[in-house]
Every structure is written in C-alpha cells, then in structure tokens.
Amino acid sequence: MIQFKRMAYPTQLDLIHAQLNLPQYLPDATFGQVRGLSAALVAECGMQAVVMNTYHLMQKPGASTVKSLGGLHAMTGWKKAIFTDSGGFQAYSLIRQNARFGQLTDNGLVFRPAEGERKYQLTPEKCIQLQLSFDSDLLFCLDDCTHIDDDAEQQELSVERTIRWAGRCRTEFDRLLDEKRLPVEKRPKLFGVVQGGNSPELRRRCAQALLDIGFDGFGYGGWPLDSQGKLVEEMVFLTRDMIPAEFPLHALGIGHPPYVARCAAHGYGLFDSAMPTRDARHGRLYRFHYQPDKTALVEKDDWFEYVYAHDKRYIKSSQPVEEGCDCPTCQSYSLGYLRHLYKLNDSLYQQLSTMHNLHFMVRLMDLLRQNLP
C-alpha cells in the first residue's frame, strides 16, 4: 500500500487570465485548439486552462502569424489561462526517435519538419521570446527530455543541458519582463522542468540546481511511464518530495485518471495529457464505476472504467454514457446515438465524446479537491 504524505501544498495558482484551484487538469490544445471543439465548448466543459505547444506553433501557423493575430488568446478565442510547453518533449518524441528530423545540441534544438526544407532553431532564449510573444500565462523552460530507461550517459547529459538551459531561460525571461515593465498582476509564471530519468541522484541534482536558479513552480520531466505503460510512481513521487511543498508541481504528460489521483494525493497540482481527448476520439469514454471515497481514490483503480463506443451492446441503449453525469453529452444524448455517430465516423461524435471525457476530468478534479486536504 502506498503511503501518501499530505503537506501544505498549493491549493491555488493565480495567473493573468484565471485563478486556478488545484489540482487542475489541462487538455491538450497543441496547435491552438482542442481537437473538435471551439473555445466556447471547451469552457462549457468546465476547463479553466489549456496547454499549447511552442515547438508546433512556431511552425504552424508560425510565430509571426500568431503575433499578427494578437497572440494566442485573441487568435483562438480562449479567454482563460494558456500554458505553453517549451518543445522539450517534442525533441524527445521526434528527434531522439529519428535523427532525420533534427538534432539536439548544447545550444538547443535544430530541426526540419518532414514536409519542408526550412530549418528551425529553438534555443533557450528563443523559447522564452516565442512564449512571451504568444501571450502565455505560464511558460516552461526548454529542457532535454529523456525516457526513464535511457542509459546513464544520456541522463547525465540531459540534466546538464536542462540546468544550463533553465539558467539561460530565466535570464532571458527576466530581461524581457524588465524591458516591458509589466506590473506584477500582468507578469506570466515561469516553470523549470526536473529531469534525471530513473536516477534519484540526478533528479536531486537537477531539482536543487533549478531551486537555486529560482522559478514559480516546476514540472516533472521525462517520459512518466515504464516499458509496460505503468506510471513510474517511485520516481514521480520522489520528485515531488525533492521540491519544497510551497511550490506547485506539474505532472507533465500524466492524464490516466487513476494515475492523476495518485499523483494529486502526493502533492501534484497540475496535469496535462492528450489521453482523455484522444481516447474519446478513438471510442474510449470515461465513467466512474462507483463514487470513490478518499481511500479508494488513491489506493484502487476499480472506480474508473471505460465505455467502448463501438460495442454492439449499446446499439439500442437509451442510457447516457454515465448516469448522473451533468455534461452536455450525457444530458442530451444516448449511448445508442453515440455508437451510431461513431460507426458513421461523423464529426459530431468527436465533439460529443470529447466534451464528455473533458467533463469527466473536471469532475475528477472536483472530487480530488474535496477529498485531499
């Protein structure tokens, strides 16, 4: 049984466009949109913040286009908080897996999109410049992401680069904000990312160096799942223990509901993942099997289950995805109709299923806030 330590972790994060109650889940809006939903529908689901991606936005539609359209809030119609990821994970998922897409150097990333000849360079300074020009509420430092199973040499290099890049990001962030002379309430937050793979020593070294540089909060860096797809709980929890309780910690890339609950119980306050929306599009709808109490939330997985939209058993079902769910989908549509839309591959299925899974995550966050002091 996992023993969770409850401490005075942050319960609120004040940002330019929103005041977030923690824990809080943020859906993936990589290119400026949650797939299949308008900004108004995302807000209707109960979302207070979304995550967009610097690496992708600098290519499509391009940084100059985002700026000419007034920044991400104006361009997308999203009025609440926007987090922008630095691009470190994309370097891992694309460049580390296939060298033809680019390379990592001590000065940052050099990459070439698959469909073009133009090269892009993303240095720590450029990463900060882009995110500030995007009008982000919360920025992440550029980091060198690794897999938990990468060898010791790669993990060591990753930590060295992540620390150096974080220092350069901090310097550029402070320089630009000093130039803008923004009042405190208009200043975005800057988070560092703790790397170190599966090594407690490297994690501790990275965490301490980032604390010495000084940030508003931190993120768990690196791929959070092992080769079997299970959460690397020991390292994820250890990283939270390394960061003083007063700092918010973001569980980057963690979105499977039972994993979210365990991490929240250990003090993580922010979560983002493409999983809930991707699962929705692929026919995996989320449902509470029963209403879990505090103990069940953090020690069991059986309170959570999938409903598969393609299942023949739902052909004539007049029931919603989940009885008692107050999302727009469950309030107005049956499982039988959703299955019909899914089999037609109709875009309305994508919209309705995504709204349901997002609202499930909102309900889970509410439940965690109520049960975890």
Image (spheres, grey):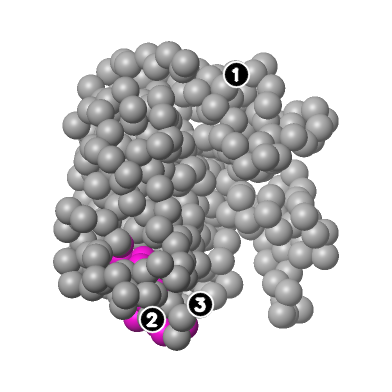
Q: Quadrant of residue 202?
A: top right
Please tell me which residue is depicted at 17% across the width and 53% down the height of the picture. Answer: 324
Question: In 3D space, how far apart are the residues under numbered discs 1 and 2 (Cα atoms)?
Answer: 50 Å
Q: CA distance from mark 3 to mark 1?
A: 38 Å
Asked if the magenta segment contains residue 354, the reply would be yes
Figure check: 333 above or below 124: below
Q: Is residue 15 above or below residue 78?
A: above
Name the residue type under label 2. Answer: Leu
Please say whether residue 101 is visible from this viewpoint: yes
Q: CA distance from mark 2 to mark 3?
A: 31 Å
Amino acid type of the residue tagged 3 in the rendering: Pro
Secondary element at tag 3:
helix
Q: Main secondary structure of the magenta part?
A: helix
Q: Which mark is residue 237?
A: none
Residue 168: image location, x then y, percent: 58, 40
> Badge 1: how crowded within 10 Å, few (<14), some, or many (20+)?
some
Which element type, helix, strand or loop, lies under badge 2? helix
Towards the viewer: 253 or 70: 253
The residue labelled by disc 1 is 204
31, above or below 304, in the image: below
Q: Look at the image and tell me in which quarter the C terminus lies.
A: top left
Residue 79: x and y in percent read: 23, 64
Asked if the residue under mark 3 is in contact with the one under mark 2, i.e. CB atoms within 8 Å, the reply is no
Q: Which residues are magenta?
A: 345-356
Pointer 3 residue = 61
Magenta residue check for 349: yes
